Image (cartoon, rainbow, N blue to C red):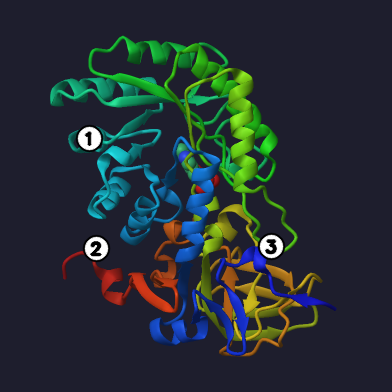
Amino acid sequence: MSTYFPTQLLPKTARATLRGLEIGGVSVADLVEKYGSPLLVYDEEHIRDRCRNVLSAFPDGASYAAKAFLCRSIARLMASEKLGIDVASGGELAIALSAGLSPADMTLHGNNKSRSEIEAALEVGVGRIVADNYDEVDRLEHLAAGIKVSPRVLVRVNPDVTAETHKSIRTGHKNSKFGVAITDNSAEVLVRRIKNSKHLYFGGVHVHIGSQMIDLDPLTRAIRLCAEFAKMVSAEELIVGGGVGVSYQNRDVSPSITEWGNAARGATLDAGFGGRLLAEPGRVLIASAGVTLYTIGTIKLGANTNILAIDGGISDNPRPAMYQARYQPLLVRNPFISSDSGPFTLVGKNCESSDVFGSDVDIPGDPRLGDLICLPVTGAYSYSMASQYNGLGRPAVVMVNRGESRVVARRETIEDLLRLDEVA
Ligand SMILES: Cc1ncc(COP(=O)(O)O)c(C=O)c1O
């Protein structure tokens, strides 16, 4: 049986050393000793590298989809790399503002933006608002007239293309709740409505058909259809969303950022669209920049399965429960994998049977009680979708770079769990 270091799943600066796994020049075992377990660790160099890849694939510009993971440090890091930021609620907007980002570099999303969310965006002067539907444009126009501003409004269109991905993260098919259809004339009517408004400025077209897409063909088809539409309505810009998939296990094959950029550019050229082409990635920027470290607390050896239980679970990363996601666990002191299936099932400590992170996995190095497990590719849609289920509280998040580590989100405490409870 051959074992190897899974470079393709780990952050750029990850190394196997005599002391086990190291990221950003820091031993991850030392990080757990210092900050506790479980712990989410991000590699700053990896994120910066990805940002540069995205901007060379999309030279007209790109924004970071903050829903993948947002805290002030990440927002500032993205801004320092010249990315804008896409926020999907008043809460995300407030976090980005509190990080000191320029409102002009923000895009407000959402399929049901409230009056107060729109007002907040208009008052600070958010650079783009992506309108999802007719009701919202009415609301937007009324509020813009009251505040006396003329926001730049894009229309989110639905191209009726089904992404090859988990059904819960498809967003461009016929019955999706997102956007207005280009297949009948709804999107065209909405664009006309915006162009005819004294208070709104029509900025362009937006499309996002899904997330974790490994096959670029449906995405390319969708971009082409939307670019044809953008050309027809004389849009200044087309934002093609995000959606590019990443490898979660060693057998996965995923497209590169360059391939994505080339496919998007090819599709817009084919459609004859001459405006700006912008992107809005989340997962591909930060998923593999992050790893979560857990401690094994229970081992059950059985006839068919050997269960390893760690000190976190779907409360800090709900992807296994939501999308049946599976990961490639590594032992921190021996961070190698074998391509063979193996005897272990890695489970969390939440009270759900869907709390499974890896099944039939091999974990070379004879895992023992107290060993640290590293779950690679947990940088996107894990912490941002985490909950306080079972009162576990969310882990601390640290960023590592050139031998230094710093906390970017502290661990949730019992006091935090009680913070919203009724006053005693
Ligand atoms: C509007 C929009 N843009 C961008 C993204 C980012 O997608 P991903 O993280 O798959 O790149 C999403 C994710 O759902 C989205 O809804």
**Relative to the observer, which residue lies in front, 14 or 119?**
14
- Whole-percent x, y for residue 260 in the image: 62, 41
Mark 2: secondary structure: loop
Which residue of the protein is positioned furthest toward the right in this rendering?
A: 1
| Residue count near mark 2 (Cα–Cα under 10 Å), binned few <14, some 14–19, many ≥20 | few
Q: Nearer the viewer, mark 3 or mark 2?
A: 3
**Relative to the observer, which residue lies in front, 248 or 352?**
248
Which amino acid is tagged 1? Gly
Q: Earlier in the sequence, mark 1 or mark 3?
A: 1
- Whole-percent x, y for residue 243 in the image: 56, 43
- Whole-percent x, y for residue 18 in the image: 62, 89
- CB atoms at circles 3 and 2 under 8 Å apart? no
**Relative to the observer, which residue lies in front, 324 or 292?**
292
**Relative to the observer, which residue lies in front, 335 or 395?**
335
Which residue is label 3 attached to? 249
- CB atoms at circles 1 and 3 under 8 Å apart? no
Which residue is label 2 attached to? 420
Query: Relative to 150, is 218 on the left or the right?
Result: right
How far apart are the two marked residues, 1 and 3, measured between alpha carbons?
42 Å
Which residue is label 1 attached to? 125
